[in-house]
Amino acid sequence: MVEPPDGEWGRYENGRWTGLVGMCQDREVDLTIAPLTVSVDRSKVMDFAYPFYYDKLVAIYKMPDAAGSKWKTLLWPFRWEVFLSLALTCIITVLLVYCVDRKLATKLKHRLAIQQKHSVMESSLMVCAVLLRQDCALPPISTPGRMIIGAFWLFTILIAAAYCGNLVAFLTIKKDIPPLKTLRDLVSQTQYIWGTIDGTLWMTVFEFSNRTDDQKIWDGLVKFNKTDTDVLAPHFPEHRQKVEKGNYVFFSERSILQMWAEDNCDLVFLDEIFYKVNFAIGFPLNSPYTRLFSEIMVDFEQNGLLHFWKRTRWHGNNKCVYEQQPGARVIGLVDIQSAFFVLALGLSLGILSLLIEWCWKHKLIKE
């Protein structure tokens, strides 16, 4: 039993194959006992027996620290489009109430009363009071204005109910949203870098793919390798350490990465599946052993032995199954820190306005 001198599995480089595939091509070995991936290009220089396992290429990474984004809790219930729509609705309501009351007062020759009681500032304060579900000290004097405020009041009741319900769900149910879901998300950000095992089929897949996202993944591998050679480390432990440190995405077979995810609940997968693969024992071309091993593998599969061996020998204790179950949890100070930030902002603005008012009055006294 020998290992490839270059430590690689097999990729096409400089007109020849490296690693295990190259050893089969040069007839340096009789067969390969390893999870070697079957591909069309490899089949041109070597033979494969009937596959003994099926897998897929996935990417795994660590979720960012949830505590670092808890200050945005008050913004989570609605998307930014909803907040923008609310702001535009409030502005339009202020203008409508002000214009309707002002127009009606002009016709009734009560313009002076309107200017004293319902300026734009007064209308804005009235709309803000309704938005916060408070009483209006100065309601509109016109019937159309009161109808507009009444409709806006019903609107704010529905919006407040939706916001409060969603906010309670975010506070009591632990559900972190993954920042990355697809390859496009990965290649369009700058926080995460990525890597894979050097000398594997994945290197060839990304390098010679016609997909734009795959080409960007390859360009990133070349770029990151110049400053951090561990992104193409030949062994899994180095990549696992980088993944668990954070800000690193690792590409490999799901069967291996699933074990990592079962041990560390902070590890998640990209939703996108990139490449489905078969694993098989490899032989030199026209080897007399290829058909013999294929027949044995077919018997193993038909008799259920491959599945039985996997179930009995390849089982893990997935502790994340119970941790990921939705349910109520105790709300901590970090969960409601955004409320304290709002209070601090209000106090700061109040103190600032007090200082400005004091300076202004002090200046008037001197004059």
Image (spheres, rainbow, N blue to C red):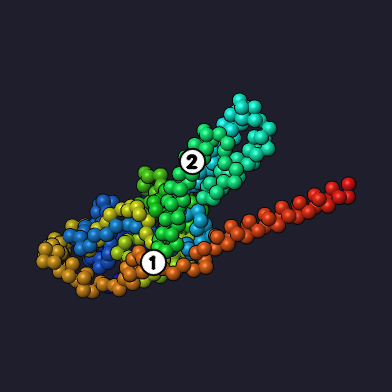
Residue labelled with disc 1: 328
Residue 95, position as x, y percentages in the image: 58, 35
Q: SS for tag 1?
A: loop
Which residue is depicted at the point 64% across and 41% down?
Answer: 121
Which circle, 1 or 2, is nearer the viewer?
2
Residue 244, position as x, y percentages in the image: 44, 67
In the image, residue 25 sits, relative to residue 125, either above or below, namely: below
Q: Is residue 20 left or right of residue 113?
A: left
Residue labelled with disc 2: 150
Which residue is depicted at the point 49% across and 68% down?
Answer: 332
| Residue type, mark 1 in image | Ala
Q: SS for tag 2?
A: helix
Residue 298, position as x, y percentages in the image: 13, 62
Q: Is residue 341 visible?
A: yes
| Residue type, mark 2 in image | Gly
Which residue is depicted at the point 41% across and 68% down?
Answer: 329
Classed neighbour count for the residue bearing mark 1: other residues with Cα under 10 Å, few (<14), some (14–19), many (≥20): few
Between 210 and 24, the one lying in front of the other is: 210
Q: Which mark is residue 356?
A: none
In the image, residue 207 sits, relative to residue 233, either above or below, namely: above
Which residue is depicted at the point 71% across and 52% down?
Answer: 353
Classed neighbour count for the residue bearing mark 2: other residues with Cα under 10 Å, few (<14), some (14–19), many (≥20): few
Between 338 and 120, the one lying in front of the other is: 120
Question: Of callouts 1 and 2, which one flags the residue occurring earlier in the amino acid sequence?
Answer: 2
Q: Residue furthest top?
A: 107
